[in-house]
Image (spheres, helix red, strand yellow):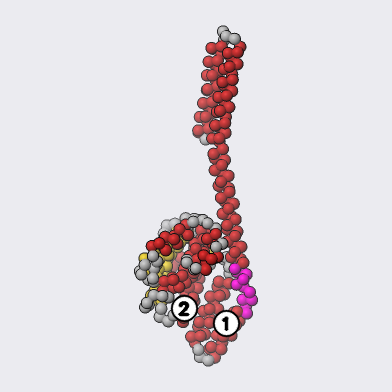
């Protein structure tokens, strides 16, 4: 019972005492009908007060019901996301050992023929598949995520020679042991190359900067690619901010357009793991480049676990 409830009950009690006192005082020398008239007024007044009071009490109950309903909806969405991830993982795991063995065979033949570039690209591709397929839904350290990015970029270097330079800036080496959802960084780097650098004239760069604040791990993934128009950027930000499940599970025709689906996927997973205050922020300027900011909660136990 809060203070307002106590005041309301006390006021009702005082009103009842004053009302009955006034009724007895005014009706003591009159007919009984006068007293019963006062009683009728009292009953009506109390009925109105009780109706209003129950409505007042129902407000926190309604709030609690809405909170529980939202929690159930969030859990349902999280379960859908996990189910979708498991389905995709199962689809990707169809005879993965055959894929690994085939890639190893190709690498062996390449080494026998002194084709070191083919051997290196095949090894990177095999490692990339193994990383993404063999551990769906698990956590990885920042170092493992960055190593996976390097394997991806090695393959891209063979596809687009001297197209993109990769840079890292890690302010504190301890955060390399920080654990995060697998495939958090590589999809964003891939998005930067595919949408920002492939069509850019000349050489570009992708830079990953990582540091920690008092309460968070912050990653900046920056490219000097084509950037985005203001209306495109605003549309992407709205999709990141909205909670419409269709944006992530339905509307396959939208996904085919490829406008930032990798960013949406990463952002959605981070929000389910850590809460809506975390996830991605995107800044972009046309013909200048794009920066994607990743915010993750700083948990010391994650850093300590990774250093053991």
Q: Which residue is mark 2?
A: 156
Question: Which residue is at a point 49% across and 68% down the rendered structure image?
Answer: 258
**Residue lying furthest left in this view?**
288
In the rendered image, which quarter is residue 50 located in? top right
Residue 37, given in percent of the width and then of the height, sits at 58, 16
In the rendered image, which quarter is residue 208 located in? bottom left
Of residues 106 and 145, which is closer to you in this image?
106
Question: Which residue is at a point 53% across and 12% down the rendered structure image?
Answer: 26
Q: Earlier in the sequence, mark 1 or mark 2?
A: 1
Residue 39, given in percent of the width and then of the height, sits at 59, 19
What secondary structure is marked by label 1? helix
Q: Residues within 10 Å of mark 2 (few under 14, many from 20)?
A: some
Q: Is residue 288 visible?
A: yes
Residue 5, given in percent of the width and then of the height, sits at 53, 32
Of residues 296 and 37, which is closer to you in this image?
37
Q: Residues within 10 Å of mark 1 (few under 14, many from 20)?
A: many
Question: Which residue is at a point 60% across and 16% down the rendered structure image?
Answer: 36
Does residue 116 lie above or below 218 as drawn? below
**CA distance for labels 1 and 2:** 17 Å
**Residue lying furthest top in this view?**
29
In the rendered image, which quarter is residue 206 located in? bottom left
- Does residue 56 appear left or right of residue 198 in this picture? right
**Residue lying furthest right in this view?**
95
**Residue lying furthest front in this view?**
253
Q: Which residues are magenta?
A: 88-98
Q: Is residue 212 magenta?
A: no
What secondary structure is marked by label 2? helix
Does residue 162 lie above or below 76 as drawn? below
Q: Is residue 143 visible?
A: no
**Quadrant location of the N terminus in the rendered image:** top right
Q: Which residue is mark 1?
A: 103
Residue 222, given in percent of the width and then of the height, sits at 40, 68
């Amino acid at each position: 019972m809060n203070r307002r409830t106590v005041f309301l009950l006390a006021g009702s009690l005082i009103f009842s005492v004053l009302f009955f006192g006034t009724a007895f005082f005014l009706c003591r020398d009159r007919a009984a009908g006068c007293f019963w008239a006062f009683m009728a007024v009292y009953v009506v007044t109390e009925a109105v007060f009780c109706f209003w009071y129950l409505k007042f009490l129902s407000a926190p109950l309604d709030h609690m019901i809405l909170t529980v309903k939202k929690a159930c909806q969030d859990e349902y969405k999280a379960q859908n996301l996990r189910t979708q991830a498991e389905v995709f993982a199962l689809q990707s795991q169809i005879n993965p050992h055959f894929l690994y063995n085939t890639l190893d065979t190709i690498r062996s033949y390449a080494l026998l023929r002194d084709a070191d570039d083919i051997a290196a690209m095949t090894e990177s591709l095999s490692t990339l598949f193994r990383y993404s397929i063999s551990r769906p839904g698990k956590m990885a350290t920042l170092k493992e995520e960055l190593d996976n990015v390097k394997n991806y970029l090695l393959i891209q270097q063979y596809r687009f020679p001297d197209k993109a330079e990769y840079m890292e800036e890690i302010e504190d080496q301890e955060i390399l042991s920080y654990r995060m959802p697998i495939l958090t960084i590589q999809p964003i780097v891939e998005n930067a190359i595919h949408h920002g650098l492939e069509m850019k004239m000349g050489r570009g760069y992708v830079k990953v900067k990582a540091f920690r604040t008092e309460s968070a791990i912050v990653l900046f993934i920056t490219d000097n690619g084509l950037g985005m128009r203001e209306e495109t950027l605003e549309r992407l930000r709205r999709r990141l901010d909205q909670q419409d499940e269709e944006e992530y599970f339905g509307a396959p025709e939208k996904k085919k357009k490829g406008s930032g689906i990798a960013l949406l996927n990463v952002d959605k997973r981070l929000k389910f793991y850590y809460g809506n205050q975390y996830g991605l922020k995107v800044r972009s300027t046309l013909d200048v480049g794009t920066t994607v900011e990743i915010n993750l909660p700083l948990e010391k136990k994650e850093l300590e676990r990774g250093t053991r």
